[in-house]
Image (tube, helix red, strand yellow):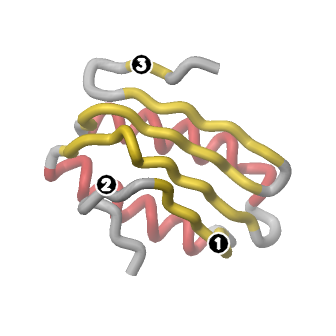
Amino acid sequence: MMPKKLGHGSYHIQLDHRVLISESYGSWNDITIKHFIDEYKLKATPLLNKAWAAIVDVSQRKLATQEAEAIAKDFELWCKNNNRAHTAIVGSNSMINLN
């Protein structure tokens, strides 16, 4: 499936059993991350009743705006508070902080 393209960056999210797999591309702003989060939460809905995992591929992602980084931190907290038990990150990106 092709990534969802927006004005700044793009992404693809798919569900495989109890694992959400996301791939992100390019530079993101607050609009792109809000679209991503809305779709991610929708796809995560059937998983929230018990532990689930995430694979996050950021190998093709570039920088994000400060606004997008702040939103990402809140989203990370949402994932932790909604039974995400494990996360595997593919690639490296300084804006990802799972602490």
Q: Which residue is mark 2?
A: 71
**In this view, the mark in front (2 or 3):** 3
Q: Secondary structure at mark 2?
A: helix
Q: Are marks 2 and 3 in contact (CB under 8 Å)?
A: no
Q: Which residue is mark 3?
A: 5
Please say if 39 is above or below 84: above
Quadrant housing the C terminus: bottom left
Quadrant housing the N terminus: top right
Q: Is residue 51 left or right of residue 39?
A: right
Residue 79, located in which quarter of the rendered image? Answer: bottom right
Q: In the rendered structure, which amino acid carries the disc numbered 1?
A: His
Residue for point 43% across, 33% down? 35
Q: Which residue is mark 1?
A: 86
> Counting other residues with Cα less than 10 Å from the Cα at mark 2, is it few (<14), some (14-19), or many (20 or more)?
some
Q: CA distance from mark 1 to mark 2?
A: 20 Å
Q: Secondary structure at mark 3?
A: strand
Q: In the rendered structure, which amino acid carries the disc numbered 2?
A: Ile
Residue 63 at what x, y percent from top left?
20, 45
